[in-house]
């Protein structure tokens, strides 16, 4: 469907943002122990 | 795109699948946008019905219809459903429909995850609503679910509420990831960041707010869950925990959440006003920077919701001044909207009416927010109907008004048909008058000292409550007309032009009407992007 040139880096961006979200979740709980 | 590439992807022409499975299996951003919008509308009607119950109880002093415990369930569930079920999904629906069209992308970056983000929602919503039918009833601790009300003293159904919030948060985070990846990786190669339309900019910034705030909410409800079921004492003072810490964590999520629900509306208004003023948007780049400033400030003002928890004066002063600071970038935005209209060739089609009402009424909500942000004054206002009036001006005549403005503005593009303009204008004035009759008297009730979240009140509050309830019934009824207008447009509307608003700018208006199932197989050129830019 998509031109390969036009979606380069989607996986990397998504993974990076997901890691930040999971990290914040863990940090919220960890800081309250 | 070369002919070789076209041959390699030989599935271009296909349309949607037939039948109900189309909606279950779809990965098309337009379908998913539509699903989000209808889900949000259904939740709006359910949440609105609960509000009708609340206002019916408050029509007169004394207990009329409900036990106080059930009344608390109504206010709690009304807030949760409207915030997590109606406003947020509606904006995600708009993002799904519009962002790929506005950046010249063929779809969202992660279409299968997009499907998953949506289909979590009906289950989470059903779990939340099912708590009404459980022993002990639905959560009754307010939408802010402060501990220990939500831990030690909460009904058993709270665990279902916690699961629903986890799911809703998960869905929002996946939605945000998708939007960030779509905007940063999928926008047309020839489109620069400062070429992007403001709805895209505001949603990109909102996505970062979601990524920063939703995991904190998830952390808070996880800790609630373990406090309730696994013997921890995060928020239990008897076990060495701190219930005030819950409030800090909640509002560290809660304040950015407020901006999550308003920034996309700012973007929408920044599209509609230039179109109907027939002028380019005044101060495009200052709009972008103001949005980013508001987002940054939203993370450092959370404790202005907690002035009465007993924080040091230095803390109160810091949170007060930081809160005041938000008025600066917000003022920039309001100024820019007014300056866009200045000496414009204005016309007042339905989307413009909603956008203009937004500017006036959201500003009222913003100013009452400033009043609440003054720490010594907040001692008087805190937990009164003044707060209720304030956030309904922000969320109903702000966020919801932005959504309705967007629906009328882009409905011709989505459906390929025009809505009934005279009827839509009549509906606007009906909603505008009734919403003010509902919420404006609540300022007076709050200033006179009527507390929030009570089913009964002293006699001196009777008149304004009566007026407010009558306004609310009328406002509630107006949504039946809105439903008719939208359904009538979809079924019987006259065919709309590709660009039904003569001065509308944006790549979405370059597409034929009715819009094809797949769009922007080839990205737009630099010339096309510049011709449709908000700068010119």
Image: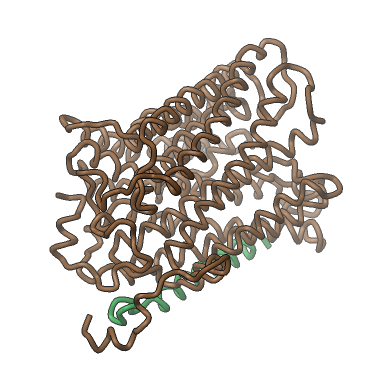
Q: Is residue B110 left or right of residue B495?
A: right
Q: Is residue B436 above or below residue B88?
A: above
Judging depth in this view, the residue of B383 and B243 nearest the camera is B383
Color style of the picture? by chain
Q: Residue furthest right?
A: B135
Judging depth in this view, the residue of B35 and B156 nearest the camera is B35
Residue B299: x and y, percent?
47, 50
Picture quadrant where residue B441 is located: top right
Residue B244: x and y, percent?
67, 45
Disc count in the image? 0
- Where does the N terminus of chain B fall, quadrant-wise? bottom left
Does any portion of residue B509 appear in the rendered image? Answer: yes
Q: Is residue B188 above or below residue B340?
A: below
Q: Which residue is depicted at the point 80% across and 35% down?
A: B69
Q: Which residue is depicted at the point 28% across and 65% down?
A: B104
Q: Is residue B69 left or right of residue B267?
A: right
Letter of the chain shown green in the rendering: A
Q: Which residue is depicted at the point 74% across and 22% down?
A: B456
Judging depth in this view, the residue of B490 and B235 nearest the camera is B490
Letter of the chain shown brown in the rendering: B
Q: Is residue B38 above or below residue B423?
A: below
Residue B374: x and y, percent?
48, 29
Does any portion of residue B292 appear in the rendered image? Answer: no
Picture quadrant where residue B334 is located: top left
Q: Is residue B51 above or below residue B150?
A: above
Q: Which residue is depicted at the point 72% across and 19% down?
A: B457
Residue B440: x and y, percent?
51, 21
Judging depth in this view, the residue of B536 and B22 nearest the camera is B22
């Amino acid at each position: 469907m998509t031109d390969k040139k036009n979606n380069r880096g989607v996986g990397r961006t998504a993974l990076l943002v997901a890691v930040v979200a999971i990290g914040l979740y863990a940090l919220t709980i960890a800081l309250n122990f | 795109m070369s002919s070789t590439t076209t041959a390699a992807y030989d599935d271009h022409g296909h349309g949607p699948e037939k039948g109900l499975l189309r909606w279950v299996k779809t990965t098309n951003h337009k379908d998913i946008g539509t699903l989000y919008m209808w889900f949000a509308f259904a939740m709006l009607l359910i949440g609105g019905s609960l509000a009708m119950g609340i206002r019916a109880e408050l029509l007169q002093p004394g207990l009329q219809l409900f036990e106080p415990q059930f009344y608390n369930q109504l206010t709690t569930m009304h807030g949760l459903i409207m915030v997590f079920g109606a406003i947020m999904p509606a904006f995600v629906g708009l993002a799904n429909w519009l962002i790929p069209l506005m950046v010249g992308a063929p779809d969202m970056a992660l279409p299968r995850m997009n499907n998953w983000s949506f289909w979590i929602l009906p289950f989470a919503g059903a779990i939340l609503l099912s708590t009404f039918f459980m022993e002990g009833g639905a959560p009754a601790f307010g939408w802010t679910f402060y501990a220990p009300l939500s831990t030690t003293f909460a009904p058993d159904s709270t665990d279902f509420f916690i699961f629903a919030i986890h799911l809703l948060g998960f869905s929002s985070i996946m939605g945000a990831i998708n939007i960030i990846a779509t905007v940063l990786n999928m926008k047309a190669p020839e489109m620069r960041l400062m070429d992007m339309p403001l709805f895209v900019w505001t949603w990109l910034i909102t996505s970062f707010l979601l990524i920063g705030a939703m995991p904190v909410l998830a952390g808070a409800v996880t800790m609630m869950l373990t406090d309730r079921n696994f013997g921890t004492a995060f928020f239990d003072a008897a076990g060495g925990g701190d219930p005030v810490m819950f409030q800090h964590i909640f509002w560290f999520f809660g304040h950015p959440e407020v901006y999550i629900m308003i920034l996309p509306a700012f973007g929408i208004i920044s599209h509609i006003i230039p179109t109907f003023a027939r002028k380019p948007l005044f101060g495009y780049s200052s709009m972008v920077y103001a949005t980013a400033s508001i987002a940054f400030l939203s993370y450092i003002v959370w404790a202005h919701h907690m002035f009465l928890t007993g924080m040091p004066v230095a803390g109160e002063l810091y949170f007060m001044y930081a809160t005041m600071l938000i008025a600066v970038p917000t003022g920039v935005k309001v100024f820019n909207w007014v300056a866009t209209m200045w000496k414009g060739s204005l016309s007042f089609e339905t989307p413009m009416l909603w956008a203009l009402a937004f500017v006036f009424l959201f500003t009222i909500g913003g100013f009452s927010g400033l009043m609440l942000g003054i720490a010594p004054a907040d001692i008087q206002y805190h937990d009164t109907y003044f707060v209720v009036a304030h956030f309904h001006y922000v969320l109903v005549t702000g966020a919801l008004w932005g959504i309705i403005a967007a629906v009328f503005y882009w409905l011709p593009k989505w459906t390929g048909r025009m809505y009934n303009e005279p009827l839509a204008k009549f509906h606007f004035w009906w909603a505008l008058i009734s919403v003010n009759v509902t919420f404006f008297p609540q300022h007076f009730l709050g200033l006179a000292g009527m507390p929030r979240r009570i089913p009964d009140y002293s006699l001196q509050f009777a008149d304004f409550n009566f007026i407010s309830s009558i306004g609310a019934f009328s406002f509630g009824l107006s949504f039946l007309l809105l439903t008719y207008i939208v359904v009538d447009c979809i079924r019987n509307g006259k065919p709309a032009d590709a660009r039904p608003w003569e001065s509308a700018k944006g790549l979405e208006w370059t597409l034929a009407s009715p819009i094809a199932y797949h769009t922007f197989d080839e990205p737009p050129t630099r010339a096309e992007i510049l011709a449709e830019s908000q700068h010119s």
